[in-house]
Image (cartoon, rainbow, N blue to C red):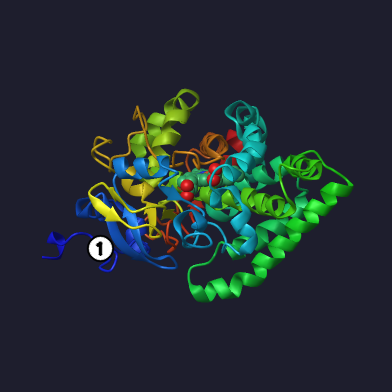
Amino acid sequence: MAQELAPDLRHPLGFDIVSGAFKADPFPTLAAMRDAGPVIPIRLPFVGRVWLATTHAACLAMVKDNELFVQEGRHAGRSGVPGFAWWLPKPLKVMTNNMLQKDEPDHRRLRHLVDKAFARRDVLAMRGGIERIADGLIDGFEGRPTVDLVEAYARQLPMAVICDLLGLTDEDRIEFSAQAMKVLNITSSLSLLMTAGAFNRMLDHARRLIEAARHAPRPGLIAELVAAEEAGDRLNAAELLSMIVLLLVAGFETTRQLIADSVILLESQPDQKAWLLADPTERMERAVEELARHASPVQMTKPRYISRDTDFFGVSLKRGDIIMALLAGANSDPAVFDAPEALRLDRFPNPHLVFSSGVHFCLGMQLARVEAQSAVGRLYARCPDLRLADPRRIEWIERLGVRGPKALPVVLRPGAARLAA
Ligand code: HEM
């Protein structure tokens, strides 16, 4: 009966997209959500009642239309920023100044300042350095029969890479990483309150980094951004702080999940792993696209406001309401992907929306790709025989929008990392 009624935000559908059971196997729920409609009303933790685009076509149309779906409340008769950015820390006032929360022309101005550093050519030039970071972390496995791959590898690598890019010292990286871990552990309103202190410490730390760069610039993006701010009209002080925090956190947890999820997938599908390891140099790029599609480590975009009343995929949307795109739904849509539940590392073409699309598509897309390719490549080059300690007992992070394991203990053959180096 309910299905015959027009979709209505006052009657949100009850899908569980946060529990460990969902994260362990999201495909059936994602299929049920697409079956319920390309745009459905749902109630989400933190965000409340929102519209959710569930299919590839609806998600793509949503993220491409940055006039109908906006970031700034003032463009939709509301105030502030919509909902809660679950994979970023609480958008305290300072965070509303970052590019992800801005519409044009401010978004373009802010993104332009950092676009070059994240462009494909510049990122490809970083591959050697990223592989060295991976090798250094694998060196640390030596003599340890089991290793938590999340803690010792997947979490460390993206943090080291972004800190290098920004020009942070090792000391800063360790301090920052500890704060970021606390902030990103938010799973409830209570934990949000408890982590406010850590977030403030992170902001204070970023402020100190900016001051240090003013007085004794080190090579890196922070110094470049400080120079842009000092030059005048391109970036103000609040935007500078917000940008640095965004760059530090946006690629940290997301890439960690992609690396850990990739190992889980490869270990669960020995035929696919064998195919990849038979010629990793040739096959890694395509394989990582498929690992990313299948895992969908960022399951949804952040919320947007609807800027005017409209009909969207047959659903009537009202100005000021909130909408999000279920990227994991898009990435498993059988209208676009043949047998979407199957991991086919040679899948091509692979028009997934892992990094979204439209003007806000992921700034760090190329970097994340090279990080994942290097992380998976070096890990299996040196530890081809690693296996999950307990494949049946993976504990998933129960947080909206994020898909990854809390920890990933792996068993290593003694001396394997050293011998294969
Ligand atoms: C596997 C890793 C990653 C995934 C899956 C991912 C995913 C995404 C997605 C889906 C968005 C769009 C969010 C939205 O529209 O609401 C986004 C935006 C963004 N990402 Fe990533 N990301 C990853 C890694 C990175 C890295 C390494 C960085 C670099 C620091 C980064 C920086 C950003 C920034 C700055 C934005 C905002 C772009 C804008 O508003 O123009 N991401 N990312």
Q: Position of residue 183 (x, y in %)?
A: 60, 64
Q: Is residue 333 left or right of residue 390?
A: left
Quadrant of the image containing the N terminus: bottom left
Q: Nearer the viewer, residue 261 or 80?
A: 80
User: Which residue position holds label 1?
Assistant: 8
Q: Position of residue 342 (x, y in %)?
A: 28, 40
Image x and y of residue 200, in percent: 68, 67
Q: Residue at x 53, y 67 (%)?
A: 186
Q: Nearer the viewer, residue 43 or 352?
A: 43
Residue 168 or residue 135, whichever sits in front: 168
Query: Is any atom of residue 143 visible in this view?
Result: no
Determine if residue 118 is in view: yes
Q: Residue furthest left?
A: 1
For the residue pair 150 and 210, the one nearer the viewer reads as 210
- The amino acid marked with disc number 1 is Asp
Badge count: 1
Query: Where, by quadrant of the figure, is residue 370 drawn?
Result: top right
Q: Is residue 245 above or below residue 120?
A: below
**Farthest-out residue, right:** 215
| Residue 205 appears left or right of 138 | right
Give the crowd class for mark 1: few <14, some 14-19, many >=20 residues within 10 Å.
some
